[in-house]
Image (cartoon, rainbow, N blue to C red):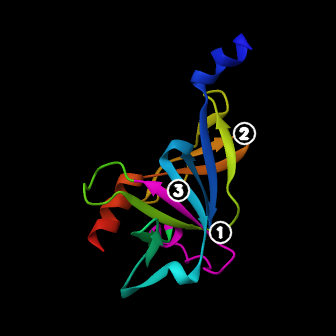
Amino acid sequence: MEQLTQERPNEVPSLAVPVAGFTLLLPTISVAEMVPYRKSRFIPAEQEATGFLGRYEWRDQKVPLLSFEELNGLPRGEVSGYNQVAIINATGVNSELAYVAVIAQGIPHVARVTPEAIQELTDADDFPYVKMTVVVEGQEAVIPDVPALEVTAAEL
């Protein structure tokens, strides 16, 4: 048991969230909740804006709902009753925005990230909302630029 507790400080419990064209890698502490997409909770955007789907009602709040792939210049993923919504804690870039939400295209799974299990891909394509592209346990993933998502969401 002692060995297990010594190894845990180096581990970052994370969530791998599939979106169209990417797998987002987020520390679990940054994800407030994963919720099933419900059309009845979705408020479509009044004005067309790239990557902005509208707002999602969650815990009595209207959270900006974004298409991560469209923000990065890829086609928008499908939105239906089979999707999930990742509610992401804001970093404080905008004091009026507590959360941003991203539509997921599959079922998220837990990823236990350790320094030995993660490697940066330095030759990966550059995307405006990707902070870093990595390989974790043989799978490519991106670490999203959450502050940039917040800035964009606050402007909409």
Mark 2–mark 3 CB contact (< 8 Å): no
Mark 2–mark 1 CB contact (< 8 Å): no
Q: Position of residue 78 (x, y in %)?
A: 62, 79
In the rendered image, the vertical position of residue 87 relative to residue 47, given as above or below = above
Element class at badge 1 = loop
Pointer 1 residue: 105
- Mark 1 Cα within 10 Å, few/some/many (few <14, many 20+)? many
Look at the image and tell me in which quarter the N terminus lies.
top right
- Determine the CA span between mark 2 and mark 3: 20 Å
Residue ranking furthest to the top: 2
Task: Specify whether 113 is left or right of 100.
Answer: right
N-term mark: 2 or 3: 3
Instruction: Using the rendered image of the protein, determine whether residue 80 is visible from the camera's viewpoint.
Output: yes
Q: Nearer the viewer, mark 3 or mark 1?
A: 1
Look at the image and tell me in which quarter the C terminus lies.
bottom left
Residue 34 belongs to the span the image colors magenta: no
- Mark 2 Cα within 10 Å, few/some/many (few <14, many 20+)? some
Pointer 3 residue: 125
N-term mark: 3 or 1: 1
Q: Nearer the viewer, residue 142 or 44?
A: 44
The residues colored magenta run 68-89
Task: Specify whether 97 is left or right of 20.
Answer: left
In the rendered image, the vertical position of residue 38 relative to residue 13, given as above or below = below
Instruction: Using the rendered image of the protein, determine whether residue 52 is visible from the camera's viewpoint.
Output: no
Q: Nearer the viewer, mark 2 or mark 3?
A: 2
Q: Nearer the viewer, mark 2 or mark 1?
A: 1
Quadrant location of residue 114? top right
Pointer 2 residue: 137
Residue 152: which disc? Answer: none
Which residue type carries mark 1? Answer: Gln
Q: Position of residue 117 (x, y in %)?
A: 67, 32
